[in-house]
Amino acid sequence: MKQAPNDQDVLHLVDEAIDRFDGNLNDLGSAIGMLMLARRYGWRVVLLIHSPGTVRKYLKILGLPNLREVVPEVGELAQRSKAWRLIEGTSSFWKVVRGQISGVRTALVDPPSKG
């Protein structure tokens, strides 16, 4: 199994994307934002936030074949995601991602727990 990239590896990926980017900086910023969120929430949560087409667009900008190689499947903050909590432990994940089940996708997260 390939070792997960550390923060320096991810920063290097971002720097490479910035160096080669040609286009709208809003797209670059959104792609980098997706990657940074995925580091802490995991790729499954990201797929519940963004459409598959948007994820493909951002991966192309970042020069990545997929998120699975660079971020965890389920990150340490995944439980804060309302969408993740709705589908966690069910077989509905890919149906939601493909749009076969509606009303689950949301970018809303709960505040950090105090204590």
Image (cartoon, rainbow, N blue to C red):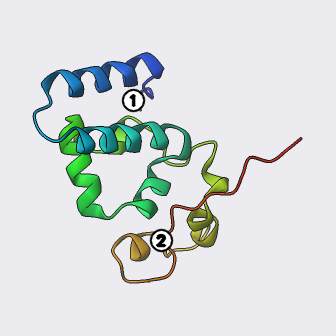
Amino acid marked by disc 2: Arg
Residue at x 42%, y 25% (from the top left corner):
5
Q: Label 2: state its secondary structure.
A: loop
Q: Is residue 95 above or below residue 15?
A: below
Q: Is residue 72 left or right of residue 98?
A: right
Residue at coordinates 18% horizontally, 21% vertically from top-left? 19
Q: Nearer the viewer, residue 99 or 94?
A: 99
In which quarter of the view is residue 49 placed?
Answer: bottom left
Disc 1 residue type (three-letter): Lys
The answer to whether mark 2 and mark 1 are in CB contact below 8 A is no
Q: Quadrant of the N terminus?
A: top left
Q: Pinpoint residue 76: horizontal percent, then vertical percent.
A: 63, 42
Q: Is residue 2 left or right of residue 82?
A: left
Residue linked to disc 1: 2
Crowding at label 2, few (<14), some or many (≥20) Cα neighbours within 10 Å? many
Q: Which callout, 2 or 1, points at the residue further toward the start of the chain? A: 1
